[in-house]
């Protein structure tokens, strides 16, 4: 085959593709302007947000200088901070316990609820709609607001913190679990049904083996995240190390604050290290780095 015939065949193929997909090769003006228009609209919205919120570059620069002063006041932690190490350590364990109980109870409650919110399990649109909207309502309230509510209901202490994390995580878990259930491969369920299994057997042997590793990974991630969240809600009186942190900030004991922050960072890193290996164990793989 000569070069001319090859070129002619390529040109013919290209002409056939253009004739078959004219919108791809010759898009309309509207499609050409769609992406630049979206970028321009987002940029305009960003600029409007800065103006509406009164963003001041000079104040931001001055604030960075003050932040540097706070960091300077925090370094190094005093020996008095480490003299109270065991007091702070007990509060840190309390914070971890709040996070663990909040995640565990929320996951246990959200697991059955997620099946009601999954379209491929509950065909009823009414039940699905009401379940999703209920989860949206619970998830729409921030955990700090839940902490303020429960502190007013049950009083100060870690019990209010556990209830706050249960409420906030319940809505998030319900949404994530239901989406994982809806994304399962239907072939396994069809195989169970074809052998005479019912809907319960389909869920047990067709869906659960696919979603449990995903759900386990999400629970471990939320446990790590809630360790930080439990610190924040402790500031409003929900117990844990956040209560000590708020007190030291209020009394301007910045060197004590740095000791507390270091303890929180070490705890988060340790939990992340353990949870990452547990996540890989759930999916049957080894971590890339040891």
Image: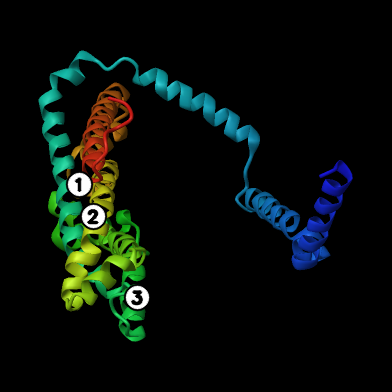
Which badge, 2 or 3, comes first in the chain's sequence? 3
Q: Residue at x 60, y 50 (%)?
A: 53
Residue 73 lies in what quarter of the image?
A: top left
Quarter occupied by the N terminus: top right
Quarter occupied by the C terminus: top left
- Secondary element under disc 3, as helix, strand or loop, is loop
Residue 69 in view (yes/no): yes
Residue 110 in view (yes/no): no
Q: Residue at x 20, y 58 (%)?
A: 107
User: On residue 119, which mark appears?
Assistant: 3
> Could you tell me residue 245's position as x and y percent?
26, 35
User: Dot 2, how many residues are within 10 Å of its Cα: few (below 14), some (14-19), or many (20+)?
Assistant: many
- Secondary element under disc 2, as helix, strand or loop, is helix
Horizontal arrangement in the rendering, residue 248 relative to residue 62 (left or right): left
> Could you tell me residue 109's position as x and y percent?
18, 65
Q: Residue furthest front?
A: 1
Q: Residue at x 34, y 64 (%)?
A: 185
- Residue position for label 2: 165
User: On residue 99, which mark appears?
Assistant: 1
């Amino acid at each position: 085959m000569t070069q001319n015939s090859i070129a002619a065949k390529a040109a013919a193929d290209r002409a056939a593709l253009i004739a078959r997909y004219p919108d791809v090769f010759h898009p309309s003006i509207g499609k050409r302007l769609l992406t630049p228009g979206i970028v321009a609209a987002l940029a305009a919205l960003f600029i409007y947000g800065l103006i509406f919120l009164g963003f001041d570059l000079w104040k931001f620069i001055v604030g960075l200088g003050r932040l540097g002063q706070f960091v300077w006041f925090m370094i190094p932690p005093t020996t008095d901070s480490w003299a109270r190490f065991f007091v702070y350590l007990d509060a840190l364990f309390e914070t971890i316990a709040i996070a663990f109980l909040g995640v565990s109870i929320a996951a246990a409650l959200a697991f059955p609820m997620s099946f009601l919110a999954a379209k491929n399990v509950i065909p009823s649109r009414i039940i699905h709609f009401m379940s999703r909207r209920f989860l949206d309502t619970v998830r729409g309230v921030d955990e700090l607001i839940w902490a303020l509510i429960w502190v007013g209901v049950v009083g100060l202490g870690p019990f209010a913190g556990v209830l706050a994390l249960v409420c906030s995580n319940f809505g998030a878990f319900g949404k994530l679990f239901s989406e994982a259930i809806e994304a399962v491969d239907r072939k396994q369920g069809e195989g169970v049904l074809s052998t005479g299994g019912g809907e319960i057997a389909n869920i047990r042997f067709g869906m659960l083996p696919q979603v449990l590793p995903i759900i386990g990974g999400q629970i471990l991630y939320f446990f790590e995240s809630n360790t930080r969240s439990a610190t924040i809600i402790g500031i409003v009186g929900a117990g844990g190390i956040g209560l000590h942190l708020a007190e030291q900030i209020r009394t301007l004991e910045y060197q004590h604050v740095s000791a507390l922050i270091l303890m929180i960072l070490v705890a988060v890193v340790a939990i992340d290290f353990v949870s990452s290996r547990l996540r890989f164990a759930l999916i049957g793989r080894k971590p890339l780095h040891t």
